[in-house]
Image: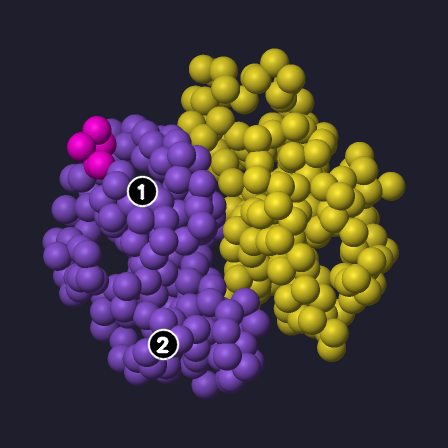
Chain colours: A purple, B yellow
Amino acid sequence: MKLYNVEVSGNCYKIRLLLSMLNVDCDIAPIDIANKEQKSPAYLQKNPFGEIPVLEDSDLMLRDSQAILVYLAREYGNDEWLPSKPDEMALVIQWLSTACNEIARGPMDARAHYKFKLDINIEKAQEKSHSILTVINDHLADRDWLELNRPTIADIACFPYIALSYEGNISLDPYPNIQKWISSIKKLPNYISMPGLE
Amino acid sequence: MKLYNVEVSGNCYKIRLLLSMLNVDCDIAPIDIANKEQKSPAYLQKNPFGEIPVLEDSDLMLRDSQAILVYLAREYGNDEWLPSKPDEMALVIQWLSTACNEIARGPMDARAHYKFKLDINIEKAQEKSHSILTVINDHLADRDWLELNRPTIADIACFPYIALSYEGNISLDPYPNIQKWISSIKKLPNYISMPGLE
């Protein structure tokens, strides 16, 4: 199994994090985004979207970090990280959408603006950040994990860009339940860190 | 089972479409978005995100259209619309992320700008529309469906806002494979339409 990876990408990190927690070995192939390797013809063969990460496992080529979490959880995680019961599965899947919608348009975009100088409407990214962080902080008022009273790929999918919020000049001070949730994730067995999270 | 629904929403329509194809009965509860019912305290109890659709099935309350497709497919669709095999499941799930990321930031946002006068960066929405439509058109060059050589919730999730592109002044003329794919979906058993797709 091989992960096409960038160390500073939160979307790549969520895959490395689940691989570590599942104790699954995987080769790491670094992609040189400074030289736009992800837009090269060879890489576009693997992923026509021109983005990282990509996971290759024998004949399977997966291009989306949320889908990769689903694959790893179902292939290597028994029923623990993504249950097969339809209602439980759907409750978890909700947060994969949140990761690639509200969290991407909020804290991820704010970080991309400040850290990578991308052309982002920063006022809108800040507004969306506080909107989604408020909802998640309220959601965590009476529970420790996003769903099912245990860690699942819902938490893994949402964690990186929320925990990296400060790199987008978004403070987590107003969100104590989110801070507690971040601490809980960092204490999970086989937790690993990424640049910016130490 | 009850769907909190808005007729002109592509995200609600994808649920109605799968319900119809699965031949599953569901009560439809209209939400009055003109009077912002989705932001009312009663509705926010159901969905703190303040968005439609919501699906209620006994004790289960689901807030995200992609997760609702997963639930319906797994609960009522056998293995047909979302397979349980991890690699096949993940291939389909990729497109749920595409629906709530690239398609949302592209054709959905462009439609929101022109049809609902929302505050959207229309140049960026147009650019993102053509970028994702090009990728999908190329992807469909040598296949009839997005994955697995048959209709799945990947197609259902991506179909509405792509087929409604023209309401965001995005022409599908440059994308013949997408046009063919839209025709194929419209010919599926139990297909139903929505305002703007007739």
Task: Have a look at marks 2 and 1 and say if they share a chain.
Answer: yes
Q: Is residue A177 left or right of residue A43?
A: left
- Displayed quadrant of residue A140: top left
Residue occupying image coordinates x 21% and y 29%: A174
Q: Is residue B109 left or right of residue B180?
A: left
Classify B193 as above or below B86. Answer: above
Residue occupying image coordinates x 35% and y 45%: A110
Question: Looking at this view, is A132 or B20 the one in front?
Answer: A132
Magenta segment includes A173: yes
Q: Chain of mark 1?
A: A
Percent x, y of residue B39 = 50, 19
- Displayed quadrant of residue B133: bottom right
Per the image, the residue denoted by label 2 is A32
Q: CA distance from mark 2 to mark 1?
A: 34 Å
Residue occupying image coordinates x 67% and y 28%: B116
Would residue B111 be seen by someone viewing this image from the given angle? yes
User: What residue range appears in magenta?
Assistant: A171-176
* Amino acid on which disc 2 is placed: Asp
In what element is the residue under mark 2? loop
Per the image, the residue denoted by label 1 is A146
Classify A178 as above or below A193. Answer: above
